[in-house]
Image (cartoon, grey):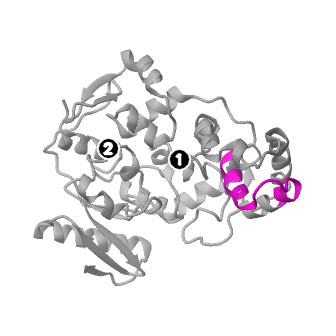
Amino acid sequence: MLSTRVLNRTYLRRQLLAERIPRPAAEIVEHLVAVQGQESDSPYLGLWARSSDFRMEELTGLLHDRTVVRSGLLRGTQHLSSGADYRWLRPTLQPALERMAGRAGRLGGCDPDAFEKAGREIIAEGVLTRPEIARRLAARFPEADLGELHFVVHLRFALLHPPPAGTWGHRGRIGCVLAEDWLGGPLAEADAETLVLRYLAAFGPASVKDVQVWSGLTRLAALMKELRPRLRVFRDEKGIELYDLPDAPIDDEDRPAPVVFLPEFDNAVLGHADRSRILHPDDRRLVMPGWSIVRPTVLVDGFAAATWERKGARIEISSFRPVASADRSEVEAEAARLIGFVAPGSEPEIVWA
């Protein structure tokens, strides 16, 4: 049996949040399988929280040279992954994305194969936005609802969003290209086994439900049963089975944990169905007040204790857990370092709400 505190310390280590050491950004992205990129700035902040020498230009360069790509992946939301991982990751997740797209119902009865062919022809014409692609498809398939087509295009086609989309501060047009064209070759076969093993390396120990909620895939119990002889199996305090890689480290519950500022939608907060290893269940509604909102959080002693918001060089911290005076000083110091990263040369202003 693993206590919640042991799971917390283990999770910090797996998420590369137990301590900052020099790590290439591309290596971090690959370790995490896919980095939440719903907001363009979030991956930069998430990488900064995990690496001692990360610079903004490093990730921007990886996006431009196609080492890292941005696309709708886990649960249909925007993520960054390595280009190499995307080749097998997108086909593995496609059944879940197809289910979300509601292939037949959302297309208003038009022929799915004809829709697929027409969509690929349109997208291949150049870098277009999703609304532009949807309008051109609607002209060919008037029986389909234009509003639904935006959603279907996002989920049905393996599209990448080339820079400047996904770069720091970008708030403008988001273009789409076919993944095969951007990466210079066809996608690979689906590989659910690799998905599960890679997930456990960065998020384990974890239950079947945890893997399913993180990925959006369903019916993984049979695969986990097949993999079971190659895995270690623990239980949490509720008696739920947790699977893990046989040689993955389990951390000591007394290991000190640094203060960490996580961006909105960070992987560490969204990695499980049961998020109690990092977020107290009673606090979940404060961090996730709506289905499409995941606020930036501050980890104190390994657990989410506050949310934060930045405007220029000002950071406002709203605590929902008691923060001791010594921890409060560490929170303020880390907030000042964050301002030094995003607004170098500015005088940081730290405010407690």
**Residue 90 lies in what quarter of the image?**
top right
Q: Is residue 300 above or below residue 316?
A: above
Q: Measuring 67% from the left and 57% from the top, which residue is drawn there?
A: 161
**Residue 276 pos. (x, y %):** 26, 47
Residue 237 or residue 103, whichever sits in front:
103
Number of numbered discs? 2
**Residue 4 pos. (x, y %):** 20, 42
The answer to whether 179 appears left or right of 119 in the picture is: left
**Residue 116 pos. (x, y %):** 80, 43
Was residue 138 drawn as part of the magenta stretch in this picture? yes
Residue 241 or residue 127, whichever sits in front:
241
Q: Is residue 238 above or below residue 316?
A: above
Q: Residues within 10 Å of mark 1 (few under 14, many from 20)?
A: some
Residue 24 seen by the camera: yes
The answer to whether 309 appears left or right of 115 in the picture is: left
Quadrant occupied by the N terminus:
top left
Q: Measuring 73% from the left and 56% from the top, which residue is drawn there?
A: 149
Q: Which residue is mark 1?
A: 75
Local secondary structure at mark 1: helix
Q: Measuring 11% from the left and 67% from the top, which residue is drawn there?
A: 324
Local secondary structure at mark 2: loop
Residue 22 seen by the camera: no
Q: Magenta part of the protein: which range? A: 136-158
| Main secondary structure type of the part rendered in magenta | helix
Q: Residues within 10 Å of mark 2 (few under 14, many from 20)?
A: some
Q: Amino acid at mark 2?
A: Asp
Q: Which residue is mark 2?
A: 274
Q: Measuring 57% from the left and 49% from the top, which residue is drawn there?
A: 76
Residue reaching furthest to the top = 229
First reached walking from the N terminus: tag 2 or tag 1: 1
Quadrant occupied by the C terminus:
bottom left
